[in-house]
Image (cartoon, helix red, strand yellow):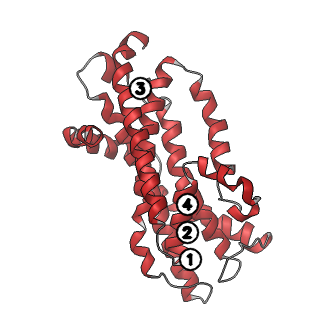
Amino acid sequence: MALFGSYRSNYFVIHQLTRRAVVSRYRGTVLGLVWSLLTPMLMLAIYTFVFGLVLEIRWPVQEGGQAQFAAILFSGMILHSLLSDCLIQSTTLISDNPQYVKKVVFPLEALPWVTVLSALFQAGISLAVLILYLLGLYLFGGGHLFGWSVIFLPLPFVMLFIVCLGVGWFVSAAAVYFRDIGQLMGVINTVLFFMAPILYPKSALPEGIQFILYLNPITFPIEQLRNFLLWNTGPDLLGVGIYTVVALVFAYLGFTWFEKVRKGFADVL
């Protein structure tokens, strides 16, 4: 209740700042918000050409021709980008907004909500592009139509959303005191990318060490997203329950940490 109470109490501020964050990302460009749609479309086209047509890489359970590997890869990239955006933005979230710390009484705990919601907006656009891509494959005989499991599509994003909130509170508060955290983000993002079944299936690893991938918070949501959208299978209810509980505990610890150390932000900045 403490976590979501921070959202309920600052609903208007969070949504206004989120809207500004989304618009400011493309401010000054000719196409504006169109880039939020164009970027994932271009990336998906590149993945289709390189991995599907040039390298001809296949997934063990892949159906519908080589072009579907791009959809498998892109589905993993969507969730990785969601967490990656939150990590990168959180490192400067407080230091880039000293006016909120020093001059006004402002609910600083609302800022991570803004970061995560703006990243979720871009993830939603990318997901829409992926769905249109899969529909195109189906219409041209290169894939299958969605099954009943598509109704669970929001579930992986909700699970990772909670984790991203915890990341936002932990990283944004810690980065105020330890500026080196910003330098580590590139390395951490690389580790998160290659230690998740994005470019390769989990079965590519020996069975005895596959559990290592589940230390990565994006691994389970990626698997669930592919189950719902690509493989037409239902959710792993036990896994979803365990992941959600751990995510909520992590987010609560991040929120508690943020509230504890925020008193020193003004002195450091």
Mark number displayed over residue 222: 4
Q: Nearer the viewer, mark 3 or mark 1?
A: 1
Disc 3: which residue? 94
Compared to residue 57, the image places residue 200 above or below, namely above
Residue drawn at the location 40% of the way across and 41% of the way down = 249
Compute the Cα span from label 2 to label 3: 35 Å
- Residues at discs 2 and 1 in contact (Cβ within 8 Å): yes
Q: Quadrant of the C terminus?
A: top left
In this view, the residue in front, 265 or 13, is 265
Disc 2: which residue? 226
Tell me the SS state at disc 1: helix
**Measured from the top left, where is residue 258 in percent x and y?**
38, 27
Compute the Cα span from label 4 to label 3: 30 Å
Compute the Cα span from label 3 to label 1: 41 Å
Image quadrant in which you'd find residue 15 = top left
Disc 1: which residue? 231
Q: Amino acid at mark 2?
A: Arg
